[in-house]
Image: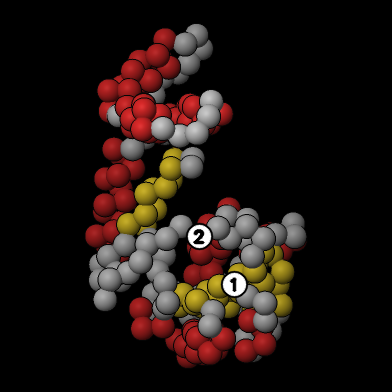
Amino acid sequence: MSLFPIFVKLEGRLIVVAGGGDIAETKIPGVLAAGARIRLIAPSITPQIAEWVRFGKIDWLPKEFETRDLDGAFLAIAATSAPGVNEAVFRAAEARGILCNAVDDIEHCHFYYGAVVQRGDLQIAISTNGKSPALAQRLRQEFEAEFGPEYELWLQWLGAARETLRAGGPSTETTKKLLHELASQPMFEEFLRQAKLRPGHRGAA
């Protein structure tokens, strides 16, 4: 079965995370970066998660998971080391029509975490449909080498250029053609050349 790739806006939405150990700790940063609210269900938590709780980034309920913990949730993440608990979270989420990811348990997942390369607003996500996370990680490393930090600055420049063109009036075929030219490889190379010439600029990585 083919997966449908999407990038979801989570800002302000409630994500329920079941589990407070190392597995949960690795899944939380990305959700926080997306601006989501997190309700974490676990009897105990790691020191790092405790820091997030202390600074008000996570709402921690120190107890075992119950179905009602999913009230108001947009997504659920089952990140415990107990397969039975993860399955219970998945079943409860499925009954409520809530998408759930059970970490490292492809049978109890509505969606997977991809291997992601991020350069500012540029995100390249890789999925193998759960068949080979190792391949996804290798490809991520290759893409990280190919798409360096300079892409973050270039995308900011492209975004500013697009907004300037859009402010001039309705989009036309000429505008669309120009935007494609601006995003071309020759323009990227020219951008890097100009950036290196700016006083005090360290150059591209």
Q: Is residue 2 left or right of residue 68?
A: left
Crowd tier of the residue under label 1, counting other residues whose Cα lies within 10 Å: few below 14, some 14–19, many 20 or above: some
What amino acid is at disc 2?
Answer: Val
- Name the disc covering residue 8, or none: 2
Q: Quadrant of the C terminus?
A: top left
Left or right, 27 with respect to 116, comes to right
Q: Residues within 10 Å of mark 2 (few under 14, many from 20)?
A: few
Q: Which residue is mark 1?
A: 74
Q: Secondary structure at mark 1?
A: loop
Query: Which image quadrant: the N terminus?
Result: bottom left
* Residue at 63 percent of width and 61 percent of height: 36
Relative to residue 171, is residue 41 depicted above or below?
below
Q: Nearer the viewer, residue 63 or 15?
A: 15
Q: Secondary structure at mark 2?
A: loop
Q: Quadrant of residue 111?
A: bottom left
In the image, residue 50 sits, relative to residue 138, either above or below, namely below
Q: Is residue 22 visible?
A: no
Indicate whether 72 appears above or below 118: below
Q: Which residue sits at x=53%, y=90%?
A: 95
User: In this rendering, would 58 be left or right of 80?
Assistant: right
Dividing the picture into quadrants, the one containing residue 193 is top left
Display coloring: secondary structure
Residue 171 location in percent, x, y?
45, 34
Q: Nearer the viewer, residue 105 or 176?
A: 176
Answer whether residue 113 is visible to the viewer in this image: yes
Mark sitting earlier along the chain (1/2): 2
